[in-house]
Amino acid sequence: MAPPAEARAARFILRRVDDDIRELVRAQPAYLFGWPVPLLDEIGALSRAAYDGQIDLDGWRRHDSDLRAAMPPVTVVDAAAVTALHRRVTEAWREARRGAADSADAEGLLTLMGRLRYITEAAPTDATLFHELAGITRQLREYSQHDNLNRSFARRAELIRGWLVTSPEYDLVSGLEWAVVGRHRWVSTPLGAVPTFVDEARRLALTDPANAEKAKASAGIRGHDGVPPAIAAAETRQAMLSSSFAILLEETWRRPGYEDLGESLAATWNRPATRRLLLEVTADGWPRAFATFDPGLPSVATGPSGRASHAQASTPIFQAMSNDLSSSRLGQV
């Protein structure tokens, strides 16, 4: 009597698996590339506990680092060899799945895949998590929310969002790096350099043509293809920060009898205390490094007596500000 088709398929697939891979799956070695298998299993259990919400991200990173401390650093050559074997095991597992092989064999291959991955992949950095979140949210936007797999992805995305909510590197509201958003911490106005509210900086970053690709790629993270309405509305609030003051100052230039008031308004705007107040007023929502950042660019409010010199100097000052505010210095805070 001929064996069942599933059994024939399983034996056929196992014959195609490399001998060394088959031996690794069946022999259960004590070491993989010099790493004790029990240690790799402990690292894997720690990862699963983190994604199950049993431990927080800091705890995961700390314990993962402690477990790896006794092992020598993974060299580039070792990493390449591990990656190559992982690729072959992954392909064998896919073939086993396609061919309806014995579930135990597929499970063994899956376990080996995990152990190999744990050799080279420590607890994730913020950058790794952000990249994972971008991929998950893209998947969720492309496929049905009612699919069981997608419900699992949604839970994982929510977990990663919780981990990254206080990240000093990534802003989940805009879906961009804080270094990109932070380039707009200060903007040029008729009164000189003015700090921005965080949502206005997000709006400027998302509408900057230089960030078009990043904005497109991060649409799933912020939940909007373009600029979310709440961020778009920030432009009005930002304008209010200095426009009323600028209008009053301009009127003192035009109307006789308000010269003293104009000089007083200009002096008030240019005071260091006013600059500090503007920083504090706009600081909410910014990471600390950006909340307190001052590029040292001048306030240039000018009273009626200095109007002529202000008009002559305004354009080059603004051009200098534009260059300074987009410089690498802001990305280094």
Image (tube, helix red, strand yellow):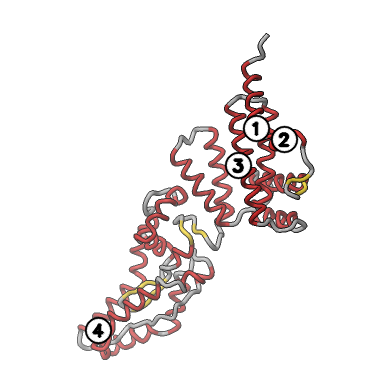
Mark found first going from the N terminus, 4 or 2: 2
Foreground: 314 or 125?
A: 125
SS at circle 4:
helix
Crowding at dot 4, Cα within 10 Å, few <14 / some 14-19 / many 20+, comes out as: few
Q: Which amino acid does label 3 sit on?
A: Arg
SS at circle 2:
helix
Asked if the residue under mark 2 is in contact with the one under mark 1, i.e. CB atoms within 8 Å, the reply is: yes
Image-based side of 19 in relation to 126, left or right: right
Residue 17: image tag = 1
SS at circle 1:
loop
Q: Marks 4/3: CA distance?
A: 66 Å
Mark found first going from the N terminus, 3 or 2: 2
Residue shown at 44% from the left, 84% from the top: 272
Residue 311: image tag = 4
Residue 25 placement (x, y as % from top left)? 72, 35
Q: Mark 2 points at which residue?
A: 25
Foreground: 148 or 320?
A: 320
Residue shown at 30% from the left, 85% from the top: 302
Give the mark toward the camera: 1 or 2.
Answer: 1
Residue 87: image tag = 3
Residue 72 to residue 295: above or below: above
Residue 13 to residue 250: above or below: above
Residue 210 placement (x, y as % from top left)? 37, 61
Q: What residue type is labelled 4?
A: Ala
Foreground: 156 or 120?
A: 120
